[in-house]
Image (cartoon, rainbow, N blue to C red):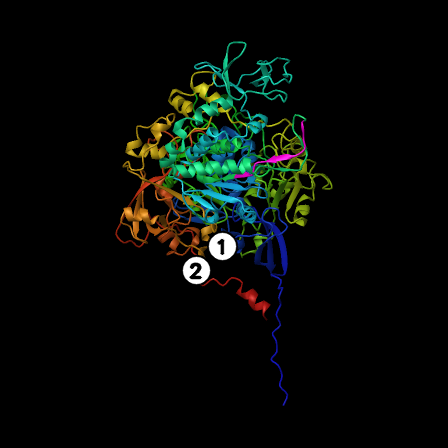
């Protein structure tokens, strides 16, 4: 008998994930990673990172992988919907697209004829503002904004008015060369995969990572040091670091004189119309004071005479008081910096208690920053020529990098906090030098960027410029002859002059109140304003449903576009169903939010890897961008309809290819020209999208090696950027330690100039439009706590610092963090991501819990000046003891997103939004930064109390009737596996 060995199984060690693979761009967060989507029998089998993509280099997070469940979500909308019941009930009838577009056109056409501003068009996290902003401009409404006003405008404006660039997705640390990285208020939801890759590089070469955040999660968990700061005090911490650096004379004066306005002369003329402005010659050129070092002065003057501030052959003074020939007293801008921040009120001892950081820690961090920047300075052997023609044999590096995000932005003092961090960087010479923060194209831009917000309508009804832009002086504001707001959200008014992204968080209250006028139609896209994207959620719901004395809704028409049955769908009169991100074209454009890195310009597309009409029987959805263009054609908007009334563009894909914002400039920079032979500028290429698809969905152009640092003053970069169309000319960009723009507003409020604020705004503008960064107590803490109510002045630091032992009504700060595994509200309806978390908790430090006799998992009430919620507590030692926190946007309203009726997201989940008022406790302004209008989400102050055992969170609302998915076990892909294994 012969023995036979058992048969070995046949194992495929490299199985193909599917029948077919297509490359596109992820949209599960703002990171915009490249992905490979594998298909089997026309269904998604697997999503993986694309290793050749410049953003993520193949890395993909849980959100990106779970895009399968985002596409196949039961919450997908299938057809246009027309409301048939009362708003908020979720009672609709399905209609066809032609009827939906006829209805929308019927509402919008009369508005455009009588007053385009009666349309308020506000979009959420859509990543297509290059189109939506242009559409609003062509419609002629000034009432357009995107989500940045409640997300990141402090970051954008603080950076663009100081550096000509900013943190967020528009700059990055020098991951290759940094020795010291400070993360300020950084959560894990933006640019996450590049940051993960970068942190890995820093760890490999032994750099130190310091995380400044009230909560230690995500990146902070792997940081070498966590500084658990009290919310809203980051600027004060930055000033203490600046104080120590100035005191020790550990600053880069050579950098400041070469690249900033540190040496520009500031006029000191209290009460005068020129007080605080720069001294200039007859041609308008800023002046400096030449100390006379033997080199000829550019104006032919001798030692001690006036000299042009941007001259290269002078030795300018940076401190001292001087008198010009006309008798005016002047000081260099840096002199004002030294005067202010060397004041003892900014010493570590003075700010320690308020920040919650030991004074010795502040002193040590300052020393470490200086040691990294100066004692470990290094050079790169790269020759370059600066904008003045001087040749340099090498590039000097300052290996200190900083990155900041929403944790510092979402405060009422966030604009000045962002500027404070930029000032700290500049003093170290650590902006766009090797080892430091680096600009990503198309930045840096001139300061301030040249595009101002549109104000007037042309003969064809279109605005003279896009609705959003950058204000340079009071005359750029959108106010009427009496100084009152012209926009429905009050952006670009005396209340919030530099609101470059608009104020989405104000539009619903103001539209309901008719302040400053009534609107007819509110049109929104991907903006869940009846739930997690709104402060004061319960009252916002009332405003959306409130009627006037005649029984008509105060906001007559609401058009809403979304891919999913979110809470906001129930409050629309007309619902336009969007595609998922795997079913449409998108342009991740250089005109909007590109995917550049510090070494190259890059943009990308999404394209349909699946056809929407094949995904389920009867489903009829359209990409909102294509819908907008068809609406524009039906309305006859300029640039969207031909003379015979036919559409100018077939759909959004056609628009991406053929639309030119300026001659040769379109949404995409790659493969331009008739045959795709040009980049950045050139005629449209009919095959452009095909070229992108063939190249993994992206285009990238390398910056020349000699042009990758000192971009603000590097001739090679400036000429390259001009050629690419990023800047208008190759002049150097002078970084602004001292902001003359802010001073112009202060002078107006002091009674100078033709455009002055109404009396009720004057003190506010004088206080907060300081040309140097300031710190003040966030408004809610200052106004809601009884002991702080009288402390209304931001000019006296001493009056704003209080001891931690003083009794206050709302002693704790409450903030949200964005988890790595969710993004905004749409992530927490994703079946796979819900397996990570289906509810949230109030996290608090065990010591804090002990003070209030709270045990782990007790139910507690959390009360602000505005309201109360009930939620379940969970101990977390990774929390600053005076702060409680939770994950953002996991809590859902019953019936929304087609979750089950007993879904934990609705029963145990909750929002802090119910505690956050959209106006200040005093009721005089929006709960926002006074400079930019940024929503102050993180100013929230609360008290906590133990409550009797509960089974669900409060408040609870009546369930929405938006359909409900079954609760069968999730078995996605089972049929594919059976087929694969026979």
The Cα–Cα distance between marks 1 and 2, rounded to whole angstroms, is 12 Å
The residue carrying pointer 2 sits among few (fewer than 14), some (14 to 19) or many (20 or more) residues within 10 Å by Cα, namely few
Q: Residue furthest top?
A: 326
Judged from the image, the secondary structure of the residue bearing numbered disc 2 is loop
Q: Is residue 872 visible?
A: yes
Picture coordinates of residue 302, whole percent (x, y)? 61, 13
Picture coordinates of residue 69, whole percent (x, y)? 51, 56
Picture coordinates of residue 588, whole percent (x, y)? 59, 42
Judged from the image, the secondary structure of the residue bearing numbered disc 1 is loop
Q: Quadrant of residue 654?
A: top right
In which quadrant is the C terminus drawn? bottom right
Q: Which residues are magenta?
A: 390-401
Q: Is residue 473 visible?
A: no
Q: Between residues 574 and 237, which one lies in front from this camera angle?
A: 237
Q: Earlier in the sequence, mark 1 or mark 2?
A: 1
In which quadrant is the N terminus drawn? bottom right
Residue under label 1, please give it.
Answer: 73
Q: Between residues 922 and 86, which one lies in front from this camera angle?
A: 922
Picture coordinates of residue 228, whole percent (x, y)? 40, 43
- The vertical placement of 695 against 38, above or below, is above
Circles 1, 2 touching at the beta carbon (< 8 Å):
no
Is residue 716 on the magenta stretch? no
- The residue positioned 30% from the left and 46% from the top of the image is 861
Give the label on residue 966, or none.
2
């Amino acid at each position: 008998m012969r023995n036979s060995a058992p048969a070995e199984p046949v194992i495929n060690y490299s199985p193909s994930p599917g029948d077919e693979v297509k490359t596109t761009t992820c949209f599960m967060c703002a990171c915009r990673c490249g992905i490979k989507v594998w298909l089997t029998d026309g269904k998604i089998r697997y999503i993986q990172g694309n290793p050749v993509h410049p953003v993520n280099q193949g890395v993909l997070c849980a959100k990106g992988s779970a895009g399968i469940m985002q596409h196949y979500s039961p919450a997908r909308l299938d057809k246009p919907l027309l409301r048939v019941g009362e708003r908020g009930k979720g009672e609709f009838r399905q209609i066809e697209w032609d009827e939906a577009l006829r209805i929308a056109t019927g509402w919008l056409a009369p508005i455009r004829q009588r007053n385009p501003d009666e349309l308020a068009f506000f979009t959420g996290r859509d990543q297509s503002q290059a189109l939506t902003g242009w559409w609003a401009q062509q419609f002629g409404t000034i009432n357009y904004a995107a989500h940045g006003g409640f997300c990141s405008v402090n970051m954008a404006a603080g950076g663009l008015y100081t550096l000509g660039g900013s943190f967020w997705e528009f700059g990055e640390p020098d991951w290759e060369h940094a020795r010291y990285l400070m993360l300020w208020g950084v959560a894990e939801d933006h640019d996450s995969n590049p940051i993960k890759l970068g942190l890995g590089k820093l760890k490999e070469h032994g750099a130190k990572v310091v995380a400044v955040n009230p909560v230690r999660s995500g990146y902070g968990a792997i940081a070498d040091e966590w500084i658990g700061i009290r919310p809203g005090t980051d600027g004060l911490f930055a000033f203490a670091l600046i104080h120590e650096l100035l005191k020790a004379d550990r600053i880069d004066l050579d950098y400041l004189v070469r690249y900033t306005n540190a040496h520009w002369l500031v006029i000191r003329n209290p009460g005068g119309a020129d007080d605080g402005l720069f001294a200039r010659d007859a041609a308008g050129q800023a002046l400096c004071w030449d100390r006379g070092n033997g080199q000829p002065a550019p104006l032919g003057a001798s030692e001690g005479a006036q000299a042009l501030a941007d001259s290269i052959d002078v030795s300018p003074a940076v401190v001292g008081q001087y008198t010009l020939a006309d008798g005016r007293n002047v000081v260099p801008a840096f002199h004002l910096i030294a005067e202010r921040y060397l004041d003892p009120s900014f010493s570590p001892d003075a700010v320690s208690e308020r920040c919650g950081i030991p004074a010795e820690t502040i002193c040590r961090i300052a020393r470490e920053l200086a040691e990294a920047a100066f004692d470990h300075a290094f050079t790169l052997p790269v020759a370059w020529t600066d904008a003045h023609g001087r040749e340099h044999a090498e590039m000097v590096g300052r290996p200190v990098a900083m990155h900041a995000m929403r944790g510092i932005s979402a405060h009422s003092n966030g604009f000045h906090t962002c500027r404070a961090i930029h000032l700290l960087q500049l003093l170290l010479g650590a902006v766009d030098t090797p080892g430091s923060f680096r600009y990503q194209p198309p930045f840096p831009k001139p300061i301030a960027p040249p595009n101002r917000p549109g104000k007037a309508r042309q003969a064809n009804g279109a605005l003279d410029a896009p609705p959003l832009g950058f204000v340079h002086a009071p005359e750029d504001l959108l106010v009427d002859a009496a100084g009152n707001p012209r926009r429905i959200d009050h952006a670009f008014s005396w209340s919030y002059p530099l609101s470059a992204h608009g104020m989405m968080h104000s539009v619903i209250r103001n539209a309901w109140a008719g302040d400053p006028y009534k609107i007819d139609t509110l049109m929104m896209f991907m903006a869940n304003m009846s739930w997690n994207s709104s402060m004061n959620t319960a009252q916002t719901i009332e405003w959306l449903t409130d009627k006037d004395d005649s029984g008509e809704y105060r906001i007559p028409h609401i058009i809403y576009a979304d891919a999913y049955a979110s809470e906001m769908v129930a409050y629309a009169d007309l619902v336009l169903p969007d595609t998922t991100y795997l079913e449409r074209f998108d342009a991740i454009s250089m005109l909007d939010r590109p995917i550049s890195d510090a070494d190259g310009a890059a943009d990308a597309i999404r394209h349909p890897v699946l056809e929407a009409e094949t995904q389920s029987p009867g489903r009829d959805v359209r990409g909102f961008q294509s819908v907008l263009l068809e609406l524009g054609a039906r309305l006859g908007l300029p640039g969207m309809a031909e003379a015979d009334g036919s559409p100018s563009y077939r759909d959004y894909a056609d628009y991406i290819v053929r639309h030119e914002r300026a001659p040769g400039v379109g949404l995409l920079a790659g493969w331009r020209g008739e045959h795709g032979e040009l980049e950045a500028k050139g005629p449209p290429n009919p095959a452009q999208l095909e070229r992108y698809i063939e190249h993994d969905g992206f285009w990238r152009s390398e910056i020349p090696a000699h042009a990758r640092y000192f971009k603000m003053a590097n001739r090679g970069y400036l000429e390259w950027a001009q050629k690419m169309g990023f800047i208008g000319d190759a002049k150097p960009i002078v970084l602004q330690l001292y902001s003359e723009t802010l001073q112009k507003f202060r002078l107006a409020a002091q009674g100078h100039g033709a455009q002055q604020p109404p009396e009720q705004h004057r003190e506010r503008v004088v206080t907060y439009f300081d040309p140097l960064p300031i710190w003040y107590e966030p408004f809610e803490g200052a106004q809601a706590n009884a002991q702080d109510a009288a402390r209304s002045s931001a000019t006296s630091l001493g009056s704003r610092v209080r001891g931690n032992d003083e009794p206050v009504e709302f002693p704790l700060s409450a903030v949200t963090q964005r988890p790595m595994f969710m993004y905004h509200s749409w992530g927490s309806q994703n079946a796979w991501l819900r397996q990570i978390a289906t509810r949230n908790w109030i996290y608090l430090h065990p010591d804090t819990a002990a003070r209030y006799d709270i045990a782990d998992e007790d139910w507690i009430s959390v009360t602000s000046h505005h309201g109360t919620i009930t939620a379940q507590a969970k101990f977390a030692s990774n929390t600053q003891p005076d702060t409680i926190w939770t994950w953002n946007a996991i809590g859902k309203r019953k019936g929304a997103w087609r979750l089950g009726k007993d879904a934990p997201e609705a029963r145990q989940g909750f929002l802090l939004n119910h505690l956050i008022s959209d106006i200040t406790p005093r009721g005089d302004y929006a709960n926002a930064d006074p400079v930019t209008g940024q929503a102050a989400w993180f100013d929230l102050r609360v008290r906590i109390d133990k409550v009797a055992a509960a089974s669900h969170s409060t408040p609870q609302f009546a369930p929405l009737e938006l359909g409900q998915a079954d609760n069968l076990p999730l078995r996605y892909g089972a049929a594919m596996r059976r087929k694969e294994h026979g």
